[in-house]
Amino acid sequence: MIKKKQKKRKKQISFNKTHWQAGTMLYPLPAVLISCGTEPSKYNIITISWAGTVCTDPAMLSISVRPERHSYEIIKKNKEFVVNLPSRSMAKAVDYCGVRSGRNVNKWDVCKLKAIESQHIKTPQIESCPVSIECKVKQIIPLGSHDCFIAEVVGVSVFSDLINSKGRLQLEKAELISYIHGAYFAPGKLLGTFGYSVKKN
């Protein structure tokens, strides 16, 4: 008996999901301004979205940078940088610092950003950012298109008006920017606080 060829059946996705191409789809992400350089003539800023927390004790974070970017060699050489968290009013500067190279333009001047002294490192902070996180590079991991810089947090500076009378940091009032698949967004509605799903009324 000749067996009939069976047609291959595509796997059906439940509900209304569609298969999407494999890629970086972990959103939303913070849109941050990385300041780098230890001499005024070498200061630069680069917009990064591939950034995240990697350890609590010691406090550590990571940023991923393409080796061809101007800031890459600056950070690699000096082994330090500052992660500056911008507010929604800085959205245009955030975008500009991501699409223009410090090799060709002074981003500080064009975006009217002021460099101020950090507490523990030579790299400056951006004065207008509500939060600035000073970092020292501990490890550089080549991954492919990007290299991952693992860094220890050695200092944090925040706007004083974000701290309430009880000493709580009200970061939700800073209107920080997030990045979602090629676009910038400001925070939306509060949905709940950590642990609210199991909190007793």
Image (spheres, rainbow, N blue to C red):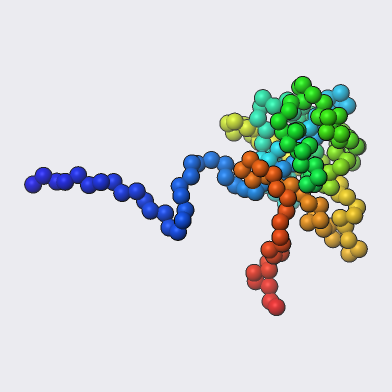
Which residue is at 48% across, 45% downward? 20
**In the picture, residue 73 is in which quadrant?**
top right
Q: Quadrant of the C terminus?
A: bottom right
Tell me residue 117's x, y (percent): 91, 37
Tell me residue 166's x, y (percent): 89, 64
In the rendered view, would you say 7 is above or below 81?
below
Q: Is residue 154 visible?
A: no
Tell me residue 174's x, y (percent): 81, 52
Which residue is at 69% across, 76% downward? 200
112 displayed left or right of 146: right
Tell me residue 139's x, y (percent): 69, 35
In the rendered view, would you say 130 is above or below 70?
below
Which residue is at 86% across, 42% downward? 128
Of the pair 194 and 172, the residue shown nearer to us: 172
69 displayed left or right of 11: right
Q: Is residue 89 visible?
A: yes
In the rendered view, would you say 66 is above or below 181?
above
